[in-house]
Every structure is written in structure tokens, then in C-alpha cells.
Amino acid sequence: MAFELPPLPYSQRALEPYVSADTLSFHYDRHHAGYVANLNRLTAGTQWEGAELDAAAQGAEGPIFNNAAQIWNHTFYWRSMSPDGGGSPSGGLREAIAAAFGSIDEFRRKFADAAVGLFGSGWTWLVADDNGLDIMQTANADLPLRHGRRALLVVDVWEHAYYLDYQNARAAYVEAFLDHLVNWEFAAQNFAAR
Ligand code: MN3
């Protein structure tokens, strides 16, 4: 079966004013959909035709890896945000974050610093592995799956994620993500899925 573009989990206006419909339209309809079209074109007639997306994002190289991973990353990023997002985590995830980072506020500061400080294009993740929770930065299309780590949450810090709304002010975008958009319920589901 061909690789498919998963539906957005909300309308393109749902994250306004923090992420505009204009940004979501470009980001989903052009960037995300473009990766899907590229991957289907690139994999035709190769060992990756009809593969599971996870397998291609984990094991492929070059352009096939880049496009498979970017599909995975964007699907995860949409779910890392919610029109009802923001606030702070609860339950077991809250305790694990406090244990790993000192406090929720300290996590927030470290996550924002990592996202703002990532040079160039990439992603900032909250991840889990055998050692507990950590903040991970990946460049370009790279993702935790390829490093044996489990993603709980991600923010896209490629310029196309925020430039229409925030221009070069990546810090303002990251702050809006943490204050108004971050989907702690999704992170808690991923945390509980161990
Ligand atoms: Mn993107």
C-alpha cells in the first residue's frame, strides 16, 4: 500500500492565533503532503515500496529516510499540539518530569532553551529511554526512533513551522507552543504506552 497523509487531528484554524491557518495550510498541505508524494515516488520499485513507515524511518538512508522520517515527525508534531493545549502535565508523567528535570518549571526552561538554541532546521523532543526522561534535539529529519528512544512530545523548529507567524522570533513561537498548544494528554499516553 502506498504511504498516506494522515488527517490533521483538528481544523486548520484550530490553533489560531498561536499557529495561523496560513501556516498550517502551508505546513500540512504542502510540506507534509509533499513528503508523502516524494516518498511514494522515491520508493516505487525499491525494497521500501509498501513498507511500514516506522521501518523506513528507522532503517532507510538518504532521501527515502529523509522523507519517511519527515512524515513520521510531522504526524507526531500535529498530535503534540491541541486547541485545548498548554497547562502542565499531571499524574505519572508529572512525577517523571519532576524526577528527571527537577521541576516542571525547570523542564519548561530546558525544553525552551533546547528548542530556541537548536542551530538550523530540526526538532526538539521529550523522550523516554531506559534511563528515564530526557530532552533530545535532532537535526533535519532525524528522530528518536533511530536512536532507540521513545518520543513523548515534539516541537518542529524548522523555519517553515513559524516564519509566517513569528518571522525570526523562534523564542516567541516556542513560548506559545508551551503556553497554549502543548498536548500533555498525548505525551501522557505515549509515556503510559511503555
Ligand atoms: Mn515542519
Image: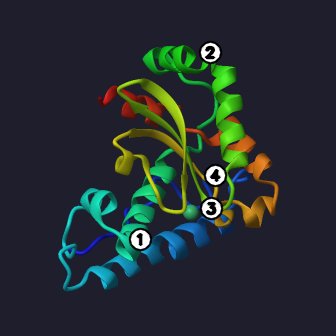
Q: CA distance from mark 2 to mark 4?
A: 30 Å
Q: Position of residue 48 (x, y in %)?
A: 22, 73
Measuring 30% from the left and 66% from the top, which residue is drawn there?
A: 60
Residue bearing mark 1:
67
Mark 4 sits on what residue? 15
Front one among 58 and 70? 58
Q: Which residue is found at the position 44% from the left and 74% from the top?
A: 35
Residue 114 relative to residue 189: left or right = right
Q: Which residue is mark 2?
A: 102
Q: Secondary structure at mark 3?
A: loop
Separation of marks 1 and 3 at Cα, in angstroms = 15 Å
Residue 121 appears in which quarter of the rendering?
A: bottom right
Q: Quadrant of residue 44?
A: bottom left
N-terminal label among 3 and 2: 2
Q: Which element type, helix, strand or loop, lies under badge 1?
A: helix
Residue type, numbered disc 3: Ser
Read off the residue under disc 3.
121
User: Is the residue marked by circle 2 packed among few (<14), some (14-19), or many (20+) residues within 10 Å?
Assistant: few
How far across and how far down the image is residue 12, in percent? 58, 61
Mark 3 and mark 4: span between their CA atoms?
22 Å
Quadrant of the rendering where the N terminus is positioned: bottom left
Q: Position of residue 164 (x, y in %)?
A: 75, 67
Which label's residue is closer to the chain start, 1 or 4?
4
Local packing at callout 4 (Cα closer than 10 Å; few below 14, some 14-19, many 20+) is many
